[in-house]
Structures are given as C-alpha cells and as structure tokens.
Image (cartoon, coloured by chain):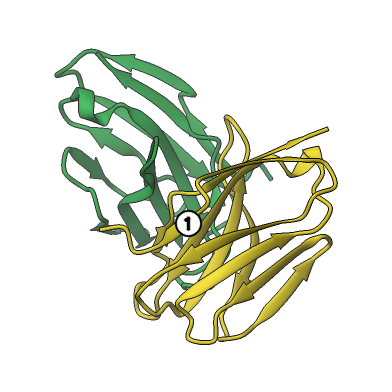
Chain colours: A green, B yellow
C-alpha cells in the first residue's frame, strides 16, 4: 500500500493564481482531512470529510475549497492564492471519523505564494 | 485560541539524558495523541491515551494522561539521536469526529 500520497511536493505560485493540491489514500479510509502547518502555529485543520460526498469546514477554511467525489481522493483547491497561504499542507486519513483513530499523514506539500 | 500548550518549545540534550515534554490545557479532552514528525515528512502516531491517569510505554518512551484528562506528558529515558524530531500532542473530543486540536510542538535535538 502507498498509504497517503500528496502531489506536488513543492509549488510556487503568484498572488491571485489558483491551484489544486492532490491527496489520495489507498487504505479505504472514510475520514480525510487537510491541515496547514506554519512555524510557531502547529497544525491547523482546514477542511475535513467523513465520507464520499460529505465535507465540512475546519478551523481555517477561508480561501480553500474541497470536494470528495470518491473515497480515495480529497483535493484541496486554492481559489486565489495569497501570501498568507504560504505554508506546508498535510493531508491525513483515518479508518473512521473517531477521536481515537490513528491519523495517517501524507508527506506534505510546501507551497510558497509570492 | 491555542487550547493545547506544549513545553518546552525547544530542547537540546546529550545522548543518554532523560527528558520530559508536557502538553497542557484548561479544557478536558476525550483522547490525547502524541505524534513525532521528522523534517520533510508528515507526523507519525506514537500513542493514543483515552483514560484519565492512563500510562502507556513504548520502549524508552512513557506517556501519561492526567487524571482530569486536561494534560499529558511524554518521558524519554536515555535519549538517543534517533529520538530527534518534533513532538506534537493532539487532543480529540467525543462528537468532534476525527478532528484533532494540535499543540505547537516540542522540537527535540539529541546530540551524540
């Protein structure tokens, strides 16, 4: 199993550009989520999904969209990139949407917005 | 609002020393997880504790959940260079599904 995969690994955007960060998992997990990690801020939840067709907002959702058309994929869209969105983005998944479940994280996407 | 406070923020020690990392909150959590993250990688789960007062051991690592489920600690005995990394605590609440609240982390460096 590949686990949780994320592409691209690195990305540089100009302010105002849009892009999609890809996330896929092959473990048949129901729960998937996106976090951003900033220096001195820890990991903050952007959006999450408890199953195909179901998504909801986390702590910092503004400027991001998500969709979950299949169990495997959970892309994160930046609508109009801003320098404040410069960060490292992690996708995570777990078997169930339970507070005790193990979260499996992808390797991350390092995004720079100029 | 940072609900989970980790201390210390940075820790640099010599191989063989013992250390303790703390994760504190004024709020009650249903579960507390500890993750370790290495540079350029995603966090990896070390342990989950769910019962107040619970103690779990993973080789040289000992994890404790406070009696009131508001705090946790991670103790490493005889630290090794391979223990170097960012240690994150994450709290979960019943009804919040899989959503976790993360602390800012403790960056540990163990020198040979």
**Residue B43 image position (x, y, % from top left):** 57, 46
Image quarter of residue A85: top left
Front in this rendered view, residue A54 or B59: B59
Viewport quadrant of the C terminus of chain A: top left
Q: Secondary structure at mark 1?
A: strand
Viewport quadrant of the N terminus of chain A: top right
Front in this rendered view, residue A33 or A43: A43
| Residue at which label 1 appears | B6
Location of residue A48 with respect to A96 vertically, above or below: above
Front in this rendered view, residue B25 or B58: B25
Write the residue at 27% across / 56% down.
A58
Location of residue A54 with respect to A98 vertically, above or below: above
Image quarter of residue A90: top left
Location of residue A108 with respect to A56 vertically, above or below: above
Write the residue at 40% across / 70% down.
B25
Mark 1 — on which chain does it sit? B
**Residue A38 image position (x, y, % from top left):** 37, 36
Location of residue B42 with respect to A33 vertically, above or below: above
Residue count near mark 1 (Cα–Cα under 10 Å), binned few <14, some 14–19, many ≥20 = many
Write the residue at 74% across / 44% down.
B83
Locate residue A4 relative to residue B84 in the image: left or right: left
Give the number of callouts: 1
């Amino acid at each position: 199993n590949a686990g949780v995969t994320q592409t691209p690994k690195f990305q540089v955007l100009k302010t105002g550009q849009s892009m999609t960060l890809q996330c896929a998992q092959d473990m048949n997990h129901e729960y998937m989520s996106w976090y951003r990690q900033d220096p001195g801020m820890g990991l903050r939840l952007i959006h999450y999904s408890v199953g195909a067709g179901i998504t909801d907002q986390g702590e910092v959702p503004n400027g991001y969209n998500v969709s979950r058309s299949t169990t495997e994929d959970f892309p994160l869209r930046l609508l109009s990139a801003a320098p404040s969105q410069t960060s490292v983005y992690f996708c995570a998944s777990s078997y169930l949407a339970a507070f005790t479940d193990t979260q499996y994280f992808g390797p991350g996407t390092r995004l720079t917005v100029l | 609002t940072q609900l989970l406070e980790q201390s210390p923020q940075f820790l640099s020690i010599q191989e063989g020393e013992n250390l303790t990392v703390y994760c504190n909150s004024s709020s009650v959590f249903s579960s507390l997880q500890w993750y370790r993250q290495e540079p350029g990688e995603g966090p990896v789960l070390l342990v989950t504790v769910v019962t107040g007062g619970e103690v779990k051991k993973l080789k040289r690592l000992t994890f404790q959940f406070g009696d009131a489920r508001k705090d946790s600690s991670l103790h490493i005995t005889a630290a090794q260079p391979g223990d170097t990394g960012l240690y994150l605590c994450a709290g979960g609440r019943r009804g919040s599904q899989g959503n976790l609240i993360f602390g800012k982390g403790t960056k540990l460096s163990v020198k040979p």
